[in-house]
Image: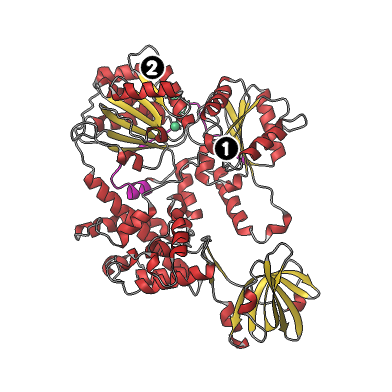
Amino acid sequence: MGGDPFGTPVSALRGVGPARTAALDAKGVRTVLDLLLLTPTRYEAPPPPKPPETWAVGDDVATTGKVVAARQVRSRRGRAFADLRLDVGGRAVRACFFNRGWLAERAPKGTWALVWGRATSVAPPTLSAAGLRVLAAPEEAAARAAELEPRRPAVPGVAEGVLRGLVREALDATRAAPDPLPDDLRTARGLPTLADALRRVHEPATLDEASEGAARLLFDRLLALALASRARGEAGAAPAPRIVADAKVRARIDARLPFRLTPGQRAALDEILADLARPVAMRRLLLGDVGSGKTAVAVGALLAATAAGRQGLLVAPTDVLAAQHARTLSQWLAGSRVRHALIAAGVPRAERRRAEAAAAAGELDLVVGTHAALSDAVLLPRLGLAVVDEQHRFGVLQRLKAREKGERPHLLALSATPIPRSLALALFGDLAVTRLAGRPAGRGTPTATTCDAASALLAVREAVARGERAYVVFPAVTSETAPALEREGRALTARRGALAGLRTATLHGGLPPAERAAALDAFRSGDVDVLLCTTIVEVGVDVPEATTLVVFGADRFGLATLHQLRGRVGRGERPGSIRLVPTPRPAADSGASSGAARDATARLALLQRESDGFRLAEADLFLRGPGEICGLRQHGHGGALPLREGRDRGFLEAASETAGALKARGYDPDADGYYARLARALGGVRFDPPDAV
Ligand code: ADP
Ligand code: MG
């Protein structure tokens, strides 16, 4: 497999025929590198051994014995399980492996086996087995008990054991490849070689070893992104129309806004306007916490563009948000000559056609739309500035083509995604960053508390009784689970429900756009008091009368989402509060998921403690590792890298510096190789995209 072994198609591996190629492809696994990116989600090890006579039901136990009988049994529902009988020091022990009948053949009568799992009975000692290791001799037990078993996310159509074998092959195929990171740059950061790192993550002997390997893999991901973004930056210095806003234009912009800009907004707008006045395409990220007032800054810049005879474009991630922006523009621009229109789902077809035609004819000054509605290239012949709100896929921006000969529009992205500045700089090496500090006066951060469903819903009733409005957010609704939300909503508002008598509307992505718009309109106008919704309201929705927000299943949301949701309330005169209701957990599963539960508790505590989105992100970085924040874990649904807390702190800057050093040595980031492939596999940078279903 000469050339670049990371690019070898998986179909070239032994045992990968058309069926497995297709199964892997469905998971986005096409090359050897893709396979190696399928890192384990966890590493399983048996609990300490425990003599059967000391077991109690529910204990996690491990024991070693000689197999005296091994049967594959088919349950009445057709599922096969393996039933092993062991002799453990003269005592009969039974181990059942549900849904894994084939294990009976692995440990036939006469073999020695280490088994572990949960004790389901003590007379006779029986365990619902989780793991099995077949031993060559009983003396091996201690050593084999210390081994870690990597568990990967399931690839339907490829059994776990087969996948493990393929990963092993991929490791072998790439072992001899030269390390893409020169030795001196690698050792300067104390990192293992790539081949070592891959082996340690995929087949570690200890968790420490896995974590050392993970450090290198994380570094490589950040480096790949830094290299790619530098490549983009150099290609991106394109000529652009100058948009000059003199004092008169600025005064006209100020007069349009219904409030005085805060000093922070003023400073941010000045920085952006200075950039727009240059004949080089701006590429700028406006980072401002939830509620900091980014819309007004962006509208200021868009008005400067229209004053210069250019068209402006404002792109939002959801049609709900696009409609809201269009409404804001209508209010702020009432009586002005600036012509604007909305191009989004939910706009009647004929009206939308008219808007598209007018935009293409240069007769519209400002267009508001969703990424989805604009993707079929609505042409704006005089486009001078494109603003992308709350959308972290910068690809949208990159794809905007030059509308006039050789010229590109200026680009401004707005984001509240709480990412530390260092992270932003490292990953978007080619984007300038403007920080929007502070908030409009009078707006404090809403409080966050954790409580049960009953008291959360009581708080909703109380808020409505005071004449305020409230959101009740349900966890991730997909089109299949949407009816469940509606059912729960009906239960809450039924005669004896917790929200009986209140006026409610339901809002989720499964509804037709017109119904979505109607629900939000009713909530905005006060025709309904409570909006039962999904995280579709996560970003941008602005209803000043809303003061109370309840999140069901709060433990299942990421910090960024919860922080965004918190930003939906307390936007008016009255203070806001959010109530986090964790998923009720059956007492029985306290053992298995205690890690996840601990995690969730720590996250919720952090949210309560920290109100600043940026500091929150930094803390989150340590809680979850940056992988999740950057969306780096998403590729092929591989696992989060098992990072050790604290060590990755300097990585972002280090990766950026190393990218510079590599470039200085003439490294060509576009040449096919490990880093170029890695950057492509990661699909560019995605910051927790709002799951706007
Ligand atoms: P975000 O940065 O989260 O997008 P918005 O732009 O939606 O925030 O602004 C949040 C709220 O603050 C809106 O209701 C907006 O009208 C209001 N607002 C923005 N700037 C000011 C200001 N300078 N003075 C008073 N209210 C403001
Ligand atoms: Mg916003």
Q: Nearer the viewer, residue 423 or 61?
A: 61
Label located before the other in sequence (1 or 2): 2
The three-letter amino acid code for the residue at tag 2 is Leu
Q: 226 or 93, which lies in front?
A: 93
Of badges 1 and 2, the one in the foreground is 1
Q: Residue at position x 56%, y 49% from top?
A: 603
Point out the quarter of the image occupied by ligand 2: top left
Disc 1 on helix, strand or loop? loop
Q: Is residue 425 magenta?
A: yes
Estimate how packed mark 2 is, as few (under 14), some (14 to 19) or many (20 or more) residues with alpha carbons within 10 Å.
some
Residue in the picture at 64% in, 84% down = 112
Q: Quadrant of the N terminus?
A: bottom left
Give coordinates of residue 132: x percent, y percent: 62, 75
Front residue of 159/138: it is 159
Residue that carries the numbered disc 2 in the rendered image:
333
Reading the image, the residue beneath label 1 is: 534
Is the residue 287 above or below the residue 592 in the image? above
- Residue type at mark 1 is Thr
Residue 331, visible in the rendered structure: yes
Question: x, y (%) of residue 569?
Answer: 55, 31
Magenta stretch: residue 198 in it? no
Residue 659 as seen in the image, left or right of residue 651: left
Q: What segment carries the magenta color?
A: 422-449
Residue farthest to the front? 18
Among all residues in the image, which is located at the extreme right? Answer: 123
